[in-house]
Image (cartoon, rainbow, N blue to C red):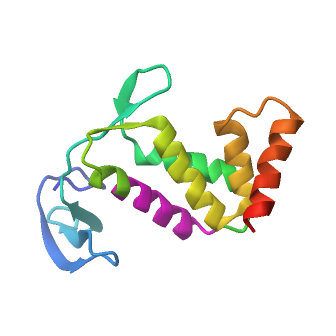
Amino acid sequence: MKCPFCGFEESKVVDSRHSEDGSSIRRRRECLSCQKRFTTYETVESLPAVVVKRDNSRQPFDRNKILNGMLRACEKRPVSMASLEKAADEIEQAVQNSLDREVSAEAIGEMVMDKLRELDEVAYVRFASVYRQFRDINTFMAELTKLLKEK
């Protein structure tokens, strides 16, 4: 393991334990050259999922894109980073657990909207307005009305 401080390629494991969610192992390491400590995570390598976009182009699944989209929707909202991370993890897990190696961008977008609806309704409406490409106030009002009826 290469040291992030000095670049030396050897370190020793000082402490090892399971992460909180049990999906990875957290290791505290100490560089054998500069003696600084750093943390690494060991996870199971999974088969890459491919996202099929609306224009039928394909790109690798990227959890960070989901998280960044939710962060933009939750800007200046009382939603914790931990809850967004958890939602992104759950979406990523659902994609990885699906039997198909290809998943549509629409399916991912719907999963994101479901998670945001649970976390914060304003963030949900923000995300939905961009994702569903609301073109006018009537479309926006129809979504708000649907949200109110669900309550």
- Which residue is nearer to you in this view: 109 or 45? 109
| Quadrant the N terminus occupies | bottom left
Q: Main secondary structure of the magenta part?
A: helix
The percent coordinates of residue 46 (x first, y second) are 20, 50
Image quarter of residue 151: bottom right
Residue drawn at point x = 41 percent, y = 60 percent = 89
Residue drawn at point x = 29 percent, y = 66 percent = 38
Q: Is residue 87 magenta?
A: yes
The percent coordinates of residue 43 (x first, y second) are 21, 61
Q: Is residue 57 visible?
A: yes
Q: Is residue 76 visible?
A: no
The percent coordinates of residue 29 (x first, y second) are 21, 70
- Which residue is nearer to you in this view: 58 or 146? 146
Is 24 positioned to the left or the right of 94 in the image?
left
Q: Is residue 105 magenta?
A: no
Is 38 positioned to the left or the right of 146 in the image?
left
- Which residue is nearer to you in this view: 121 or 141? 141
Establish if 10 lies above or below 17: above
- Which residue is nearer to you in this view: 27 or 6? 27
Which residue, as the protein is rendered here, is positioned at the far right? Answer: 137
Establish if 143 lies above or below 10: above
Residue drawn at point x = 20 percent, y = 45 percent = 47
Is 61 positioned to the left or the right of 97 in the image?
right
Is 36 positioned to the left or the right of 59 in the image?
left
Q: Which residues are magenta?
A: 80-93
Image quarter of residue 40: bottom left
Establish if 145 lies above or below 82: above
The percent coordinates of residue 114 (x first, y second) are 57, 57
Residue drawn at point x = 72 percent, y = 64 percent = 150
